[in-house]
Amino acid sequence: MRNEYDFKKGKRGAILPAATGKTRITIRLDDDILDWFRGQADAAGGGNYQSMINEALRSIAADGPAKIETVVRRVVREELKRASDPRRPRRAKAA
């Protein structure tokens, strides 16, 4: 190991160029969402959870956001089904 190194010709930044068509950004995701994507990648036998997030975002962008009416109808159906299930115990009303 040398006592001194010459960095006159050194360059700052990444050594390898970034892949074309991709941009590095920083976003904050909820821990449970990130854990879910990582779990899906592990369950698939490995892979890149970041690519899975990219695919999910791409499908939403391609299909467009769901209409609020569609979302409300789906949620109401799910809640009605859940409420009519005889195996489901009823919650006590809050005071």
Image: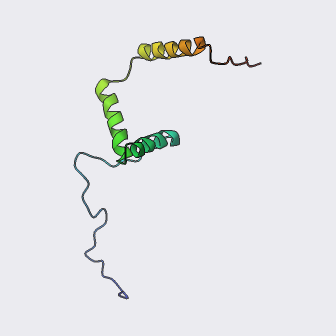
Residue 27 in view in this figure: no
Q: Quadrant of the C terminus?
A: top right
Task: Please tell me which residue lies in front, 91 or 17.
Answer: 91
Task: Please tell me which residue lies in front, 26 or 77.
Answer: 77
Place of residue 15 in the rendered image (x, y in percent of width and height, measured from the top left):
27, 64
Identify the residue at horizontal 26%, vertical 54% (top origin).
18
Q: In terms of image quadrants, where is residue 62?
A: top left
Q: Quadrant of the N terminus?
A: bottom left
In the rendered view, does 53 fall on the left or right side of 74? left
Q: How is the image coloured?
A: rainbow
Place of residue 73 in the rendered image (x, y in percent of width and height, measured from the top left):
46, 12
Identify the residue at horizontal 37%, vertical 45% (top origin).
50
Q: How many marks?
A: 0
Q: In terms of image quadrants, where is residue 89?
A: top right
In the rendered view, does 83 fall on the left or right side of 44? right
* Above or below: residue 30 compared with residue 89: below
Place of residue 35 in the rendered image (x, y in percent of width and height, measured from the top left):
48, 43
* Above or below: residue 26 compared with residue 7: above
Instruction: Pick out the residue farthest to the right.
Output: 95
* Above or below: residue 34 compared with residue 81: below
